[in-house]
Image (cartoon, rainbow, N blue to C red):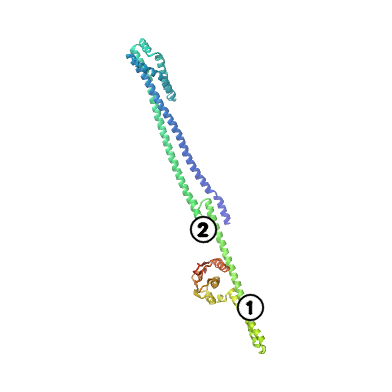
């Protein structure tokens, strides 16, 4: 039921992290897009303001130029009227030729707000030029003097010029006011763009920092914890677990890792229990075989040896050949009995079942072909699987030392604490032993591992070999 529940929870929250990433990315894109939209709009407004400012400047220049040309016309006319000098005629002709073009330029540059005033200036200017300046300057002056007189001519000219100057002045004032308004608006748009940009950038930075913190807290740290847990599992720590605090897919990953670790731990426990049962069954079978050999076949052979000795004593003296044959059969039977005893001891040492680990180790030391120094501190009987495993570790180590090490001495150390038995077998031989080679050490590793213990081999070349075992007593 637990895997189904886990899958259900995984289905409910699956995609939650992806949705959060999409939402955060969408917000970031929205903020950036908003900032760019405001910047684009501000750029368009600023460019429009620049165009309007340039047109305002051109309009002001044109209005001032018209006003200046009208004043020049009036000044040159009055100068010629009073002095009659020809130099006023040339200046007057230049102003007369330039004024229509200047008025046209002023009219073209005017917008709707200035259209009425520029039309008035245009009408007054063209009427002024068309009526009074359509003939040579001398004729104009003479005509005006004949019709109106000097004072009337001056007053009329002054009135017309003042009207044009007044309109030009109004155009300038109005345009300056409009320019100031546009300037203020452009400044407001620029300020708005700056504020929007700063706000968008600040929001983006806050969003990015917040999202980075969320990713670090919700993704990076859980993944690191899961990786550390996987490393511990790979190292054999099947009790390793990771907190299930991640969101979305990370939470599913954490729960999956924990379920996997629980499954591995359960499988390992079942495997260890199964291996222990197999070892216990094998040891019981070996003990039964050893007992059957000792109590059955070995006893029969002993009885047979006794009968042969009795038959040997009963052979007549005059039959030496028969007696020699009986003696040879008895000797062969004794050798077979010794072989059977050695075989039974190899299957399962009876001394281990009867006296425990210390006397069994002493028996191994006595039979060893290499001198053995014992350091045994086992004050009590240990669990039978532990004693059997320790016996075979020492037996295999002594056999390998006699075969391969070319050692002069072996030190066997066995110390039992409250919860663990520590064994070490060290020789002063040539070293160079390789772990995993030979079925003996592989079998010992399996036996020790089935009891939850460890078996290590340290054998540097030229510095002897040390086999160390650690067997838990619980």
**What percent of the width, then of the height, locates residue 163?**
38, 19
72 versus 14 height, above or below: above
173 and 104: which is toward the camera? 104
The quadrant of the image that shows the N terminus is bottom right
Q: CA distance from mark 1 to mark 2?
A: 55 Å
202 versus 363 height, above or below: above
Side of 98 where 306 appears, left or right:
right
86 and 112: which is toward the camera? 86
| Secondary element at tag 1 | helix
75 versus 188 height, above or below: above
Circle number at residue 297:
1
Query: Which image quadrant for residue 88?
Result: top left
Does the rendering let one see residue 469? Answer: no
Side of 270 where 71 appears, left or right:
left
- How busy is the neighbourhood of tag 2: few (under 14 within 10 Å), some, or many (20 plus)? few
Which residue is at 50% across, 43% downward?
A: 26
Q: Name the residue at the top extreme.
A: 146
250 and 319: which is toward the camera? 319
Which residue is at 55% across, 61% downward?
A: 265
Which residue is at 61% across, 77% downward?
A: 339
**What percent of the width, then of the height, locates residue 392?**
55, 71
Circle number at residue 231:
2
């Amino acid at each position: 039921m637990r895997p189904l529940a886990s899958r259900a929870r995984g289905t409910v929250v699956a995609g939650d992290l992806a949705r959060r990433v999409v939402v955060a990315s969408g917000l970031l894109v929205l903020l950036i897009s908003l900032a760019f939209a405001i910047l684009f709009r501000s750029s368009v407004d600023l460019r429009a303001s620049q165009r309007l400012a340039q047109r305002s400047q051109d309009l002001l220049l044109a209005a001032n130029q018209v006003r200046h040309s009208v004043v020049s016309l009036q000044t040159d006319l009055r100068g010629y009227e009073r002095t009659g000098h020809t130099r006023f005629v040339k200046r007057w002709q230049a102003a007369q030729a330039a004024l229509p073009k200047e008025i046209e330029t002023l009219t073209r540059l005017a917008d709707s707000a200035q259209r009425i005033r520029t039309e008035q200036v245009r009408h007054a200017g063209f009427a002024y030029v068309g009526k009074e300046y359509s003939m040579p300057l001398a004729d104009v002056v003479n005509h005006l003097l004949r019709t109106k007189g000097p004072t009337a001519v001056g007053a009329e000219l002054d009135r017309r010029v003042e009207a044009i100057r007044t309109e030009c002045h109004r155009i300038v004032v109005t345009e300056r006011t409009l320019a100031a308004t546009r300037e203020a608006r452009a400044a407001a748009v620029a300020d708005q763009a700056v504020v929007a940009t700063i706000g968008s950038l600040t929001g983006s930075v806050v969003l990015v920092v917040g999202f980075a913190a969320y990713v670090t807290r919700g993704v990076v740290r859980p993944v690191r914890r899961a990786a550390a847990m996987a490393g511990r599992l790979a190292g054999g720590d099947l009790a390793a677990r990771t907190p299930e605090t991640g969101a979305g897919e990370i939470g599913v990953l954490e729960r999956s890792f924990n379920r996997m670790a629980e499954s591995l731990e359960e499988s390992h426990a079942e495997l260890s229990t199964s291996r222990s049962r197999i070892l216990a069954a094998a040891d019981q079978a070996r003990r039964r075989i050893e007992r059957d050999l000792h109590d059955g076949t070995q006893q029969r052979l002993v009885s047979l040896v006794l009968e042969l000795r009795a038959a040997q004593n009963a052979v007549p003296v005059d039959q030496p050949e028969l007696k020699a044959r009986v003696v040879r059969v008895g000797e062969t039977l004794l050798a077979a009995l010794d072989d059977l005893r050695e075989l039974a001891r190899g299957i399962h040492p009876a001394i281990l079942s009867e006296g425990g680990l210390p006397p069994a180790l002493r028996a191994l030391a006595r039979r060893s072909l290499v001198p053995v120094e014992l350091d045994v501190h086992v004050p009590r009987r240990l669990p039978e699987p532990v004693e059997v495993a320790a016996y075979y570790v020492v037996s295999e180590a002594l056999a390998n030392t006699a075969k391969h090490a070319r050692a002069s001495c072996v030190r066997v150390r066995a110390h039992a604490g409250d919860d663990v038995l520590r064994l070490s077998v060290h020789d002063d031989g040539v070293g160079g032993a390789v772990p995993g080679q030979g079925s003996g050490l592989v079998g010992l590793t399996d036996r020790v591992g089935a009891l939850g213990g460890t078996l290590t081999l340290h054998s540097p070349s030229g510095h002897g070999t040390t086999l160390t075992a650690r067997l838990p007593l619980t």
